[in-house]
Image (tube, rainbow, N blue to C red):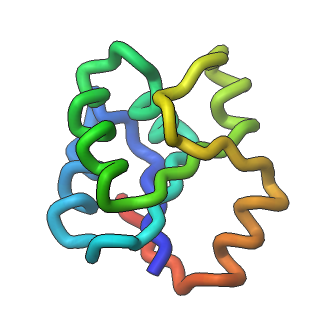
Amino acid sequence: MLYTVNRSPLSASSLQSVLRIAPAGSPILLYEDGVYAAVPGASSAPLVRAALANHPIYALDADLQARGITTVLDQIQVVGYDGFVELVEQHQVAPWL
């Protein structure tokens, strides 16, 4: 199952709730305002670093660029739309709102 998170960790607890229920190994895609969770030094950085031990985490490049984010936490994989499509083809999707 691919879990997608589009809400900023500053305004919603979507990422935290996904991490409580997502089985280890399940990929998580950050997109739209969810990409703010990928920023080093963000308040969510410790949560994301811990999650990386159990989940591959991806961030959508177009949304990073749209928000002026040029650096992400180590181990977060930045993907373009082609990578997003590949993830969707490989997994069922659970959008987390």
Residue at position x 31%, y 52% in the image: 53
User: Residue 5, percent across and down?
Assistant: 43, 53
87 vs 17: above or below: below
User: What is the residue that sits farthest to the right in this orientation?
Assistant: 82
Left or right of 64? Residue 46 is left
* Quarter of the rendering containing residue 89: bottom right
The residue nearer to you, when weighing 96 against 87, is 87
Residue at position x 48%, y 52% in the image: 57
The residue nearer to you, when weighing 18 against 72, is 72
Left or right of 65? Residue 24 is left
User: What is the residue that sits farthest to the left in this orientation?
Assistant: 20
83 vs 14: above or below: below
User: Residue 72, percent across and down?
Assistant: 54, 26
Residue at position x 49%, y 31% in the image: 74
Image quadrant containing the C terminus? bottom left
* Quarter of the rendering containing residue 91: bottom right
Residue at position x 29%, y 50% in the image: 51
23 vs 49: above or below: below
Left or right of 10? Residue 58 is right
* Quarter of the rendering containing residue 36: top left
Image quadrant containing the N terminus? bottom left
Task: Give the total of numbered labels.
Answer: 0
